[in-house]
Amino acid sequence: MQFQFLRLSARSSFILCYDLAMNRTYAILGTGALGGFYGARLQRAGLEVHFLLNSDYDHVRQHGLICESIDGDFSLPRVNAYRNTRDMPRCDVVCITLKTTQNHLLPTLLPPVVKDDTLVIAMQNGLGNEDEVAAIVGADRVAGGLCFLCSNKTAPGHICHLDYGYVRFGNHNNGVTDRLRAVAADFQRADITAECVEDLRAARWRKLVWNIPYNGLSVILRATTAQLMRDPHTRALVESLMREIAPCEPTITDEFIQKMLRDTDKMKPYKTSMRLDYEAHRPMEIEYIYGNPMRAAQQQGMTVPRIEALYRQLKFLDAANTIRR
């Protein structure tokens, strides 16, 4: 097992080894492309995992989960599947892997699965997620998980993992705790590259450098990431959006932007989660990926006209999609 990302002291190494022996219990709130992938990996590694499902509850309860992955396919014929959190046990770690469009459900979903010392991790896109969770369970029990994952749910209980998969964890109150290190170690135990970051808000802004241009443009232009990168005009638009985000976070440098572009060049052609939601007539995560960052930038006295233009176009498309829904 690799621990190079955790930078443990002798004392915390002892605590981590002790914690690993305890085998934390995990609740996965939202068993889609993201929650299904990470939860399945954790269960395969021997951890006790409990999955909240919706539309494919009956299928998964009967047949389990299938993960088709670039790292090797596997299946879990039996999983702990639930339709309601009131039926789930209280767990040591609760991973919120729902789309942010369902965050209004959290005041009802979270209380039945948390204990006094539960760590609740918002493994979602966008900005402002942890503030909402903190209002329910308290800020000292909240962390964020930034997931760099190309994955789709292609059928009930069937996850297709296309690329990447690593996670960055950060506490809502910043700073790295032994509890958060232990969660990162559980993910590494499940063959998922994981690290802890000191400044979660900075990390969220850095992830928005990718999410803001590719998610919105993929919907408006009906393009994959590869198509956006191949055309010189859309590539230039992607880069200009990235540069508009940069003043919001000092660690977003030109070198970082160029790395994002190079990494996307190497990525397999990918339909973003927002485009998949749009095509399936599901609500898009507009407020967390565009609205909240736009308002945060404006509160700092910054103008973000390109981001605002994307925000307003996506709101128009989402409203039309609502009629079709």
Image: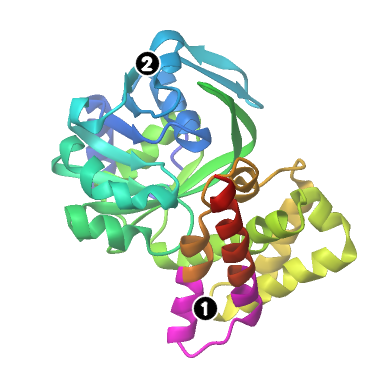
Image quadrant where residue 50 sits: top left
Left or right: 135 in relation to 51: left
Foreground pick, 209 / 195: 209
Colour style of the rendered protein structure: rainbow
Badge 1: how crowded within 10 Å, few (<14), some, or many (20+)? many
Image quadrant where residue 161 sits: top right
Left or right: 101 in relation to 166: left
**Does residue 294 belong to the magenta stretch?**
yes
What label sits on residue 294 in the rendered view?
A: none
Identify the residue position indicated by label 2 in the image. 79
Please state the horizontal and vertical placement of residue 100, each as a whole percent of the image.
Answer: 42, 52
Magenta span: predominant SS is helix
Q: Amino acid at mark 2?
A: Val
Q: Residue at x 64, y 68 (%)?
A: 313
Which residues fall within the magenta stretch?
292-310
Mark 2 touches mark 1? (CB < 8 Å): no
Please state the horizontal and vertical placement of residue 95, each as a whole percent of the image.
Answer: 34, 40
Left or right: 56 in relation to 265: left
Q: Is residue 10 visible?
A: no
Q: Residue at x 57, y 81 (%)?
A: 247
Identify the residue position indicated by label 1 in the image. 248
Foreground pick, 57 / 269: 57
Q: Which quadrant, please, contains the C terminus?
A: top right
Q: Amino acid at mark 1?
A: Cys
Sequence order check, earlier mark of 2 and 1: 2
